[in-house]
Image (cartoon, coloured by chain):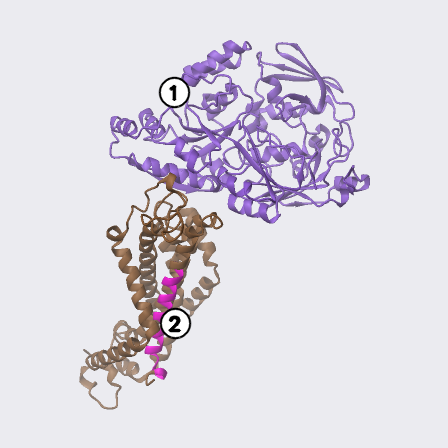
């Protein structure tokens, strides 16, 4: 899906949660409900007896309040607790979730019918008013929601009746449906009643009910037996935060973890060689890049940014460190994205050219810089630092916590940072808007890159519904971004995850999201 | 010399006369050195330590490769003696294709320098404070003991982590963090020694004839506590080297561009099953260095201990 980083590699993402993060250990009513119901039978074992399903990510969740983050690890957990109007299935086809059907009334009007029998985990029905409330809350400037940028094409949401909701967009946008998958629906009555406190122990309409959150440790969820798509097969799900990938794999091997949805490619052989584990791969929908802060010298000089791009030997890194599980990219998009321009050559590995560019920039003797990275990407970051050393650029690798990294890049403090960006919308609009449109630089200072003419092109492309014309406009933007090189464009990683061999029904999706209610353990 | 006039009095301890003291201590140093030289373990420790120090000093000359040079396609090559190894990389290569032997040689610089500098600063600073408190006593000593107690109650690792977070990693910040935690030990030992020496006749005599406090501390007390300080410094050096390795292991050390044994150990941890040599060699050399210093320190303590003198 668009935006949000695949949690483990990046850590870049959201803004710190507005609510207080506290360890919440309150009894969950839903847990008791699930036990009473028993759930469906799976190989003769009833759900209430099943051992917990343990999933591990390299980052903890940032908040329990759906619009208050831009982090993949957080979104993955929210999608289990909350539900959206629509989602995409594992083949990335649109399917109804809280909406059982929808119709496109005209270019800018979409009408959804709320699913008969869709309920909150406390038993009350989900209504069109909840949908309106959720979207309005996200878009309300007072909320200061980092996720508002993923909904900003919505002009208004109206509840026609209890089960019909109508969304009007500002312009004709072919991606509206995709964007709606990124937004959780929250219960209007409870949120209004309880205010911020609601998000310390939220109630959603998803397959799992929130039970507890121990900061930097784990989130515990209990099955919601009334979920519209059937009760989850496993009664308890624990999402653990384990930042160090080596520890993550060790836990997987020892059985302390059942599923790791995203793993660094360097563990591929090790996982494949272990008969207790199943290695899963899928075509990726993310790109890895190094962000360059164009507001800081010497990164304000485009020649320096181009030199840094030319100095990286992507093929060697992919072959040696990523076990072949990646494809080099020439710009911010991978080839499947609408707006990708195959004629853009990008930056071939060329040390002499890189040195010449530095010389031209007046930095022939090189310079010192610091590259922020997270533990999972330390090795690749150090390999790149070694390559930049070849052109005289002395890069110190600064390994920090994902949350610290988010803060540093959002506030524009990072000089260079290694990150990844997931965009499974297969349309350049999302990436261009989030990373290269000036309007987003207030929330996410990042590279500080802004160009008025590029803003206009992005605006025009996003408002163009004719897909051919849209692609053409985005290709223009693609060329500008590649020439300006606010990023060091690296590669498109192949999605790689692993489960214990006894885990059944887990699907590694191209977009890196996961849903667990059809997963069981043999 | 204020003491010169009465120093020859048979009733006074000869040590009160610096000239006599010097002569006697020279004799003692020779005797101590002899005892030390007879201690095989201590000599073994000294030789190993000197060899590693020499290795650090001559790193650019003896290291076969640039410790930072990466050969990604030659990564995880085993040591020369194993199948697949080559004499090009005697101890193999790490996860980025860097020569492990060269990194070990360069890494010695951090361990040796951080160890020496930290221990020297700690010993000078801590001993002086301890000597002042122990000699003067009274309110100043009370405040010193209070400070020591508070200081020792503070968890060192937390302090070091906090400093690294505030100041960022780097050799200077690392040494500062180690000094802040390390001076206390010297202060306590020296204070105790000085308190007992203070009441001894030669000190009393010096005071009686009007020698100034600072002179008494510098000329009469400090030389007499040098032994314990040296022994402590040796044992502390081992502790400091381990602390440096631990902080580097945690990523709080001297920074990622300088090879250190602790950081190598940490990087190798992820490859323990695929490539044991990444973590094993730095682990072994840390142990060897620390053990050699401890052997020497123990030998020094025995050599200085009057109760063991005639063995």
In this rendering, position of residue B96 left or right of residue A277: left
Element under disc 1: loop
Element under disc 2: helix
User: Which numbered tag is attached to residue B189?
Assistant: 2
What is the letter of the purple chain?
Answer: A
Q: Which residues are magenta?
A: B286-308
Q: From what the image shows, is residue B15 above or below residue A290?
A: below
* Residue beneath disc 1: A345
Front one among A157 and B304: B304
Dominant SS of magenta comes to helix
Residue projecting furthest to the front: B83
In this rendering, position of residue B180 left or right of residue A494: left
User: Which numbered tag is attached to residue B180?
Assistant: none
Residue A463 is situated, as x and y percent measured from the top left of the image, at 53, 12
Q: Is residue A469 visible?
A: yes
Query: Which shade of the palette goes to chain B?
Result: brown
* Quadrant assignment for the C terminus of chain A: top right
Residue A289 is situated, as x and y percent measured from the top left of the image, at 44, 30
Name which quarter of the figure residue A415 lies in: top left
């Amino acid at each position: 899906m668009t935006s949000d980083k695949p949690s483990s590699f990046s850590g870049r993402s959201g803004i710190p949660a507005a609510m207080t993060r506290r360890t919440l250990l309150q009894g969950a009513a839903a847990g008791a409900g699930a036990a009473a119901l028993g759930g469906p039978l799976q190989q003769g074992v009833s759900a209430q007896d099943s051992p917990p399903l343990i999933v591990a990510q390299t980052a903890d969740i940032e908040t329990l309040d759906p619009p208050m983050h831009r982090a993949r690890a957080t979104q993955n957990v929210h999608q289990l607790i909350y539900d959206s109007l629509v989602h995409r299935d594992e083949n990335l086809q649109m399917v109804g979730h809280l909406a059982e059907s929808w119709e496109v009334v005209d270019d800018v009007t979409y009408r959804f019918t709320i699913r008969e029998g869709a309920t909150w985990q406390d038993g009350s029905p989900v209504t069109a008013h909840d949908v309106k409330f959720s979207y309005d809350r996200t878009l309300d400037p007072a909320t200061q929601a980092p996720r508002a940028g993923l909904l900003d094409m919505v002009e208004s949401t109206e509840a026609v009746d209890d089960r019909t909701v109508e969304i009007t967009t500002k312009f004709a946008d072919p991606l509206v449906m995709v964007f709606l998958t990124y937004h959780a629906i929250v219960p209007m009555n409870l949120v209004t009643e309880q205010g911020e406190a609601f998000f310390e122990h939220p109630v959603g309409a998803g397959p799992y009910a929130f039970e507890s959150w121990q900061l930097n440790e784990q989130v515990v969820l209990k099955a919601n037996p009334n979920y519209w798509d059937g009760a989850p097969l496993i009664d308890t799900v624990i999402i653990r935060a384990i930042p160090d990938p080596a520890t993550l794999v060790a836990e997987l091997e020892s059985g302390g973890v059942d599923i790791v949805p995203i793993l660094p490619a360097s563990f591929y052989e090790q996982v494949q060689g272990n008969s207790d584990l199943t290695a899963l791969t899928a075509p990726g929908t993310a790109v890895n890049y190094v962000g360059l802060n164009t507001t800081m010298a010497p990164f304000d000089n485009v020649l320096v940014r181009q030199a840094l791009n030319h100095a990286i030997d992507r093929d060697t890194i992919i072959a040696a460190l990523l076990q072949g599980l990646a494809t080099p990219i020439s710009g911010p998009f991978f080839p499947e994205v609408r707006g990708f321009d195959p004629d853009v050559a990008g930056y071939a590995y060329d040390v002499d050219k890189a040195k010449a560019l530095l010389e031209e920039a007046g930095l022939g003797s090189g310079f010192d810089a610091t590259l922020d990275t997270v533990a999972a990407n330390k090795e690749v970051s150090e390999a790149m630092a070694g390559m930049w050393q070849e052109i005289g650029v002395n890069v110190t690798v600064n390994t920090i916590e994902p949350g610290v990294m988010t803060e540093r890049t959002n506030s524009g403090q990072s000089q260079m940072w290694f990150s990844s960006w997931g965009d499974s919308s297969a349309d350049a609009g999302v990436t261009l808007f989030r990373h290269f449109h000036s309007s987003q630089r207030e929330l996410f200072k990042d590279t500080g890159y802004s160009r008025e003419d590029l803003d206009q092109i992005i605006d025009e492309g996003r408002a163009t519904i004719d897909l051919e014309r849209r692609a053409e406009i985005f290709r223009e933007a693609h060329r500008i971004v590649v020439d300006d090189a606010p990023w060091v464009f690296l590669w498109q990683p192949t999605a790689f995850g692993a489960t214990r061999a006894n885990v059944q029904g887990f699907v590694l999706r191209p977009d890196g999201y996961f849903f667990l209610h059809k997963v069981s353990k043999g | 010399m204020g003491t010169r006039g009465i120093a020859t009095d048979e009733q006074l301890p000869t040590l009160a006369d610096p000239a006599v003291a010097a002569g006697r201590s020279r004799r003692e140093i020779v005797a101590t050195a002899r005892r030390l030289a007879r201690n095989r373990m201590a000599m073994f420790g000294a030789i190993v330590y000197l060899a590693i120090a020499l290795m650090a000093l001559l790193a650019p000359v003896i290291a076969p490769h640039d410790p930072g040079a990466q050969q990604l396609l030659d990564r995880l090559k085993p040591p020369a003696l194993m199948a697949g190894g080559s004499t090009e990389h005697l101890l193999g290569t790490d996860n980025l294709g860097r020569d492990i032997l060269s990194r070990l040689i360069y890494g010695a610089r951090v361990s040796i320098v951080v160890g020496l500098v930290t221990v020297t600063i700690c010993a000078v600073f801590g001993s002086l404070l301890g000597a002042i408190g122990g000699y003067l006593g009274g309110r100043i000593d009370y405040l010193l003991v209070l400070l020591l107690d508070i200081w020792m109650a503070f968890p060192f690792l937390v302090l070091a982590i906090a400093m690294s977070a505030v100041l960022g990693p780097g050799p200077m910040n690392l040494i500062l963090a180690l000094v802040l935690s390390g001076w206390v030990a010297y202060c306590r030992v020296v204070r105790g020694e000085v308190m007992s020496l203070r009441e001894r006749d030669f000190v009393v005599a010096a005071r009686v004839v009007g020698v100034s406090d600072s002179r008494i501390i510098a000329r009469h007390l400090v030389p007499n506590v040098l032994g314990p300080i040296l022994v402590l410094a040796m044992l502390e050096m081992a502790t400091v080297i381990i602390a440096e390795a631990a902080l580097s292991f945690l990523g709080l050390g001297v920074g990622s561009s300088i090879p250190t044994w602790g950081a190598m150990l940490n990087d190798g941890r992820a490859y323990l099953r695929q490539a044991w040599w990444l973590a094993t060699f730095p682990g072994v050399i840390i142990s060897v260095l620390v053990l050699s210093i401890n052997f020497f320190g123990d030998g020094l303590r025995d050599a200085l201990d009057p109760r063991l003198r005639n063995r």
